[in-house]
Image: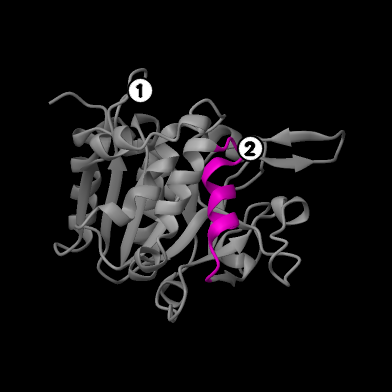
Amino acid sequence: MNILFCGDSHAQDGVLITTLSLLKNTSEELHLYILTMHLPGFKPFSKKAANFIESLLKQKNTANTLTLIDCTNLFTKQVPLQNMKTRFTPYAMLRLFADQLQQLPDRLLYLDDDIIVRKDISQFYKQDLHNTELVGVLDYWGRFFFHNLHTKKIFDYLNSGVLLLNMPEIKHTQLFSRVRALMQVKKMFFPDQSAINKLATKKKIAPRKYNEQYRLQKNTVIQHFTTSFRFKPYFHTLTVKPWDVERVHSVLHLHEYDDILNEYLKIRHNLYQDN
């Protein structure tokens, strides 16, 4: 099972938590790929953190691997100039260079770093990708506001936090190449997510359980801790990330992942520990 992450040093805690959840719920070999880069004002995902996470993978199965890939040169050659000052860091856009990296496999499951895997994802991962660029779940809020008028489906706006990627098809249609070009010249509210939805024509919509963005459900397989809206006691936005364990308990009143989060709290110092 091939898993793709992107991020700077701030993604390290989230990737660790997601990895722990994958190890708990996956019996197959895991091959993790983390895309990072060096940019002024940011620190890349560290080799130290990558090595520690890989050691956890190999404790479960010696065949498991982790590959940290520096995408600095690729990014600087095609900077998404119009979207460099959005609320999202440039590191989120690194997945758009996946088609330029020969070491990446044909089938990739991209995951944001604020995700916890709750159940076995094999069925989702192994689904047929014939004539498909990517598979995702509708964006919980964006489905109401963003539509592709050239399609017949009213709800077709995918959340990009969980995407099953068919790299040969993406290369064939030049989807990521066209998305990168668009982001150089057009500013968008949700930069790469909006561009992917605008340009992808061979996409499948998966059930909500594979990217639950609002509140834990009985059948949730993957929970995504996105910023959401709440209406009581007054209208407000709510953001709680998995690594903020105290707020996961006090604000979300969620204890579903206590075994994973307790393990994370015990070992997280290894991400930053000096040699």
Image quadrant in which the C terminus is located: top left
Relative horizontal placement of residue 144, taking residue 14 as reference (left or right):
right
Alpha carbon separation for disc pair 2 and 1: 22 Å
Viewer-nearest of discs 2 and 1:
2
| Colour scheme | one colour
Q: Residue at x 43, y 77 (%)?
A: 129
Which residue is under mark 2?
A: 189
Which residue is under mark 1?
A: 42
Asked where in the image residue 238 lies, by quadrant, the reply is: top right
Image quadrant in which the N terminus is located: bottom left
Asked where in the image residue 73 lies, by quadrant, the reply is: top left
The residue nearer to you, when weighing 173 against 67, is 173
* Disc 2 residue type (three-letter): Phe
Q: Residue at x 25, y 45 (%)?
A: 53
Residue 257: x and y in percent read 51, 51
Report crowding for label 1: few under 14, some 14 to 19, many 20 or more residues within 10 A (C-alpha): some
The residue nearer to you, when weighing 71 against 127, is 71
Asked where in the image residue 236 lies, by quadrant, the reply is: top right
Residue 183: x and y in percent read 50, 41
* Disc 1 residue type (three-letter): Phe
Would residue 225 be visible to someone looking at this image? yes
Relative horizontal placement of residue 211, taking residue 108 as reference (left or right):
right
Q: Judge whether 2 appears above or below 41 on screen.
A: below
Q: Was residue 107 drawn as part of the magenta stretch in this picture?
A: no
Q: Residue at x 32, y 53 (%)?
A: 98
Q: Which residues are magenta?
A: 186-202
Q: Residue at x 29, y 68 (%)?
A: 106
Q: Was residue 199 drawn as part of the magenta stretch in this picture?
A: yes
Q: Judge whether 134 appears above or below 130 on screen.
A: above
Residue 210: x and y in percent read 55, 65
Q: Are marks 2 and 1 in contact (CB under 8 Å)?
A: no
Relative horizontal placement of residue 16, taking residue 135 as reference (left or right):
left
